[in-house]
Amino acid sequence: MPAQALYLKWRPRTFDDVIGQGHITQTLRNSLIQDRVRHAYLFNGPRGTGKTTMARILAKAVNCLHPDPALRPCDECAHCRAINEGRFLDLIEIDAASHNGVDDVRDLRDKIAFAPSEGRYKVYIVDEVHRFSPAAFDALLKTLEEPPEHAIFILATTEFDKVPPTIKSRSLTFEFRRVSASDVAERLARIADEEGVIVDHAALELVAMQGTGSVRDSISLLDQLIADPSQPITLDYAERLLGTAGARLVGHLVQAIIDQDPATGLDVLNRAIEDGADPGQFGRQIVEYLRNLLLVQTGGPSLVQANDEMRAVLGQQAGQISRAALIRAVRAFNTANGEIKGGWQPQLPLELALIESARPVQPEPVAELPALARERDAGPGPLPPPARSRAQAQAAPTPEPEPEPEPSGETPAISLSSLRNAWPDIIRKLKESRVNIPLAAQLEYATVHSVDGRVITLVVGTSAFKTMLEQRQDKLVEIIRKIFRVTMTFHIVLAGATAPRPVDDTIVDDPLIADQLSSGAEISQFEDNQGGMR
């Protein structure tokens, strides 16, 4: 007779044996003590976290013969022993993966009306309930709405989103969590001691990490390692048998990424593959290591489940790599793991991810903000100086106005489009100043017509506005100098008067039109983006 698998031999039989699900065991115990057992439960969580095991323990507890509800299941009475041996008639287990039709549910519904044969309750455990067909769910719904007093349903699923809301609303839902690596390693150590196997604690930690929170998977991996119970299991033996690379190799590869040394990293990667490491497993180890590095860098070493030596190494490396480079490496190797398909060079995605991660991080270009935007982001500036008295103004020498340059036809110092885009901000900034509110009001009636060299042409509707703006040209020149870092002058004309015809930047940039203009041609009119002619 073949030996029993360890995960079956060491399956928990009482609430005390379950690890990592204390929030569920405590709630179920309280419901048993208060005799408030529900008719339907929905257990959701990853595989190997104890959903079916918890369902069997609950089935034993509700049918246990022990007089004290706090000690149920006792695992010693006739009903508990019968459930352990699989001969309890009132415990019906259904695999929804193979019995997912409406006829199967109808057959269940027909038999559920019969009273229990041995125990107090008839317990139906439906595993992988999300595999039911829509018609089967509809047939089950009627039973859940009006269940017999002696029936309890325990539904288990790994895909909660596939269970209809109507089923969820009629069931008491429990979320099973992945078990921490430390709890799994402790359970593995207990099993190894009971089995008389000598295992290094580091090997148990490796097995627990490879189990990714699934107790059943971790125990199965330990069972795989125990080929000869008399042979001690070392970390090196566990790494070779499980196809994983040593933590030191992974650390050396990550250090090569930090040092931006892809040659050394490729050497470490290929050496690990040649020594028998599985590329997919090695890639997952790299992602896990980089994730721990990111956790240490962001929140501190306490977030990482590792020994003190490993935490010290992670803390040292976390200070040697930038956050952007670390996030890029995590994404690159996480993507590479999904691309490993066991081809003739399965390590190729890992090599590409390594080269991508080891290159220097290019700083993102940041456009220089105009002075006006910088002033706006910095908040309101200091108040303007107080106005000078008439005597002070007469005593101070009057500066001579700068001569107004003539239109030269040279390349504009400011593009017309950038000036028009900044014009609303210029008016807004003037309104924020106490002394420039009148100028802002006047500029609202002015239109930026064109830019020729260092001359800006404004068009106004009335001669009064033209006069007032001409009197405040020095303030306009100062504002433009602050924003664009260039000195410009203003040419203010009345609407309808002769003025340089505005030419959009996109027109000037056209090589054919630019060639014609250089030959002496002129633009008589053009259509704007609104369909109008100018």
Image (cartoon, rainbow, N blue to C red):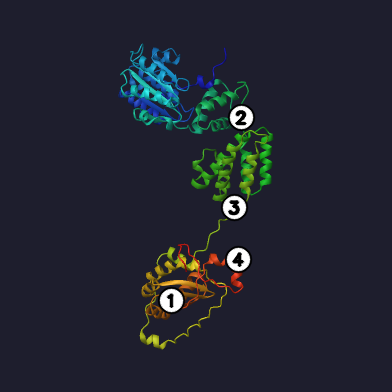
C-alpha span from label 1 to label 3: 56 Å
Mark 1: which amino acid?
Answer: Gly
Tell me whether the residue at label 4 lies in contact with that at label 3, contact meaning CB atoms closer than 8 angstroms. no
Residue nearer the viewer, 502 or 259: 502
The residue tagged 4 is 512
Instruction: Of the two numbered discs 1 and 3 on the same chain, state the one appearing first in sequence.
Output: 3
Mark 2: which amino acid?
Answer: Leu
Residue nearer the viewer, 398 or 489: 489
Q: Quadrant of residue 398?
A: bottom left
Mark 3: which amino acid?
Answer: Val
Instruction: Of the two numbered discs 2 and 4 on the same chain, state the one appearing first in sequence.
Output: 2
Q: Nearer the viewer, mark 2 or mark 4?
A: 4
Tell me whether the residue at label 1 lies in contact with that at label 3, contact meaning CB atoms closer than 8 angstroms. no
Q: Tell me the quadrant of the picture where the N terminus can be found.
A: top right
Mark 4: which amino acid?
Answer: Leu
State the residue at coordinates (69%, 35%). Answer: 274
Q: Residues within 10 Å of mark 1 (few under 14, many from 20)?
A: few
